Image (spheres, rainbow, N blue to C red):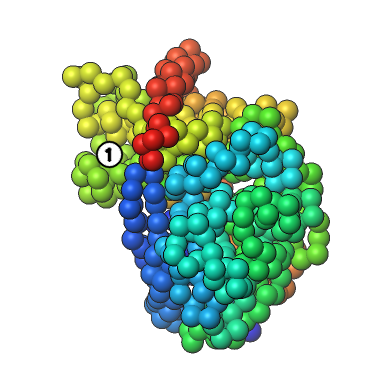
Amino acid sequence: MAKYVGAIDQGTTSSRFMIFDHGGKVAGISQKEHEQIYPKPGWVEHDPAEVWSRTEEVIGEALKSTGITKDDLAAIGITNQRETAVVWDRNTGEAVYNAIVWQDTRTDVICDKLMADGGQDRFRAKTGLPIATYFSGPKVRWILENVDGAKAKADAGDLMFGNMDTWVIWNLTGGTDGGLHITDVSNASRTLLMDLETLQWDDELLEIIGVPRSMLPEIHSSSEVYGEAAIPAVKGVKVAGDLGDQQAALFGQTCFAVGEAKNTYGTGNFLLLNTGTEAVQSKNGLITTAAYRIGDQPAVYALEGSIAITGALVQWLRDNLKMIKAAPEVEELAMSVENNGGVYFVPAFSGLFAPYWRSDARGVIAGLTRFVTAGHLARATLEATAYQSREVVEAMNADSGVALESLKVDGGMVQNDLLMQFQADLLDVDVIRPAVAETTALGAAYAAGLAVGFWAEQEDLRENWVEDKRWSPTMDPEQREREYRHWKKAVTKSFDWVEKEDGQ
C-alpha cells in the first residue's frame, strides 16, 4: 500500500521533488537550480529543456536517497511558477524559444496596445486581471510575432503553449508519445485568456490578444486524476494534482475558509486571501484569481497581491554585488547595524507589481549618505520585503472590508527571524510560521492525494497543520508609521524611469 505522495515544485530559480507522508511531513527531497538568462534589461528567460531535465533528475534523486520506490507513491502533484510561458513544437517536443519568465517586461509595447482601447482594466471584469507584462498571454503573442516561423507553425496547428505546469505534465506523461496537454483553473487564470466565471478559454480574448485556440491546453480541476507518469523513475504513478505555486501554498496552509490568508516569501512575495466561491473584483490594485477547484466542486477564488522582487533581491546582493556568499548570510550582515541608516531599497528591477502595476519603474536605493555601510544595505534589502507586503495587506483590507488579524507565512525567507519580526512590527499583527514551511509543494501533494483518496477530505489536511513559531509586534506606532511614510516616498522615486524609446 502506498505510504507517500510526491510533489514536483517547479520554481523560478530551481526545481525540486518532495515526498510527503500522510501526516504532511517531509519524507524526502531533492532540488537543483537552473540558469537565469537575462538577454536584455527587463528580459528574463529559462531554458525549458534544462528545466525539464533538472525536474527529471530531482525525481530520481529524491527516490534514490530515501529508498522510496514508485510503488510507495499514491500520486504525484505539480506546482509551478505560474505566468512563465513556453511554446513548443508538438511533433518534436522542442521549444521554439526560451521560456519567458513571469518577471519579464518585454511585452510592455503589446500591453500598451491592448490598453489603448479600454485602459489597464479592459479585461478585468472577465479575467480578474489588469493588463500587465506579468501574465502569460501577451508573452505567447510576442513569441508568435518575433520568432521566425512561429506564427506559421501555430496557424498550422503544430505549436503548443503552456505555463510551466503544462510543460512539466506533458513531458512527465510521455511528451511526443502521448503526453497530456493540460492545465488547471489556477494556472489558466494567469494567462489573460480565461473567463473567471466559465473557467474556459474565451474566444474574444484569444482573438484580441492574438493566441490561436489550437495552442492551448485543456483546462481541468486542480485535484483529479489526469493520467499516469511515463518516465522510468515513476512510471505508472497517477498524476493527479496541479496548482500554480501561490495557490498551492494557500492550499498547503489549509486556508480553506473565506477570509483566511497566507503570504509566501520566495523569489517574489505573494499574499492570497480566500474569498470562497465569489470572485471579488479588486478596486485597490490587487488581482482576482482562481485559487483551486477540487474535482467537480465549485471553484474557489482568491484576492492576490503579487510582488515581483523580494528573495530575488537577496540573490542580487549575492550574485551581482558579491556582498554575501550565501543567502542566509544577509541576516547576519543586517544585524550588524541597529537600523537601516535611513536607506530604503525599492527593488523595481522589472517594474512594480501590486498594487502599482508600473512597468516603467526601475530599482532605486534612496537615502544614501556616507554613514551607510553594507550592513545598512542588507537591512534595507530585508525591510523592502516587509514594506511591499504591508502595501498589499492594506489593499487587501480595503478590498475585503475585513482587517487582517494574523498572517500565515511560508517560503524560504521565513527562516529569517529579523525579517519576520520586522514584518510583524510593520503590520501590527502576529506572523505565524507552520512546522512545514514549504507549503507550496505540500499543497500540490494535498491536491494529488485528495484525488486518489490518500486523504479522505480537506478537514484531514487541517489536522496536519501545526504552528512552529510566532512573531508578535513590538514596534512603537509612531516609528512604524514614520518608517512606512519614508518607504512610500522612496517608491515614488522609482516611477517613470523607462522611456518608450529605451526599449527596456
Local crowd size for mark 1, using a 10 Å CA cut-off: few (<14), some (14–19), many (≥20): some
Residue occupying the point 53% across, 45% down: 110
Q: Nearer the viewer, residue 179 or 417?
A: 179
- State whether residue 219 is above or below residue 93: above
Q: Nearer the viewer, residue 67 or 38?
A: 38
Instruction: Residue 98: give x, y in percent of width and height.
Output: 42, 63
Report the number of numbered marks: 1
Check the picture and name the quadrant holding the N terminus: bottom right
Q: Residue at x 71, y 32 (%)?
A: 400
Q: Secondary structure at mark 1?
A: helix
Residue at coordinates 49% horizontally, 42% vertically from top-left?
108
Q: Quadrant of residue 499?
A: top left
Q: Position of residue 239 (x, y in %)?
A: 62, 75
In the image shown, does 455 or 323 lie closer to the viewer?
Answer: 323
Identify the residue under disc 1. Answer: 332
Rendered position, 202 above or below 372: below
